[in-house]
Image (cartoon, rainbow, N blue to C red):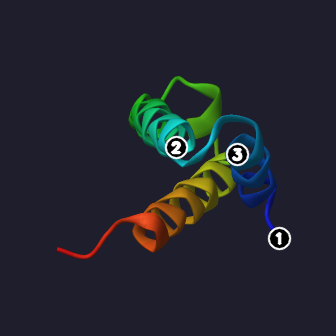
């Protein structure tokens, strides 16, 4: 289980699905913006892969809880 999945599980238990979904969406926006800023800490070569993996993990979780249309 990734650190992101642990965070999600904690938030689900503490805050419920809707709040967790909103938190994941906000976090995705923050991480994506940080990676676009080449001067940011997350965009540094040593950290970029970690943030990219976190983004993939959050996106995967969101897909798993979204209702099919």
CA neighbours of label 3 inside 10 A, class few (<14), some (14 to 19), many (20+): few
On-image quarter of the N terminus: bottom right
Reading the image, the residue beneath label 1 is 1
Tell me which residue sits at (47%, 73%) in the image: 64
**Element type at mark 1:** loop
**Residue drawn 45% across the image and 61% down it:** 62
From the viewer's side, name the closer residue of 24 and 30: 24
At mark 3, the secondary structure is loop
Q: Which one is earlier in the sequence, the residue at label 1 or at label 2?
A: 1
Locate residue 52 relative to residue 13 in the image: left or right. Answer: left
Residue 7 in percent (x, y) is at 76, 47
Give the residue displayed 52% in from the left and 23% down from the top: 39
**Mark 2 Cα within 10 Å, few/some/many (few <14, many 20+)?**
many
Q: In the structure shown, which secondary structural element does the residue marked by tag 2 occupy?
A: helix
Marks 3 and 2, the one that precedes in the sequence: 2
| Disc 1 + disc 2, Cβ < 8 Å | no
* Residue 47 in view (yes/no): yes
Neighbourhood count class around disc 1 (C-alpha, 10 Å): few under 14, some 14–19, many 20 upward: few
Residue annotated with mark 3: 47
């Amino acid at each position: 289980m990734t650190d992101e999945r642990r965070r999600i599980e904690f938030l689900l238990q503490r805050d419920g699905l809707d709040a967790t979904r909103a938190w994941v969406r906000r976090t995705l926006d923050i991480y994506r913006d940080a990676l676009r800023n080449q001067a940011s800490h997350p965009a540094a070569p040593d950290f970029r892969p970690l943030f990219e993996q976190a983004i993939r993990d959050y996106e995967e979780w969101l897909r798993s809880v979204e209702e099919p249309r």
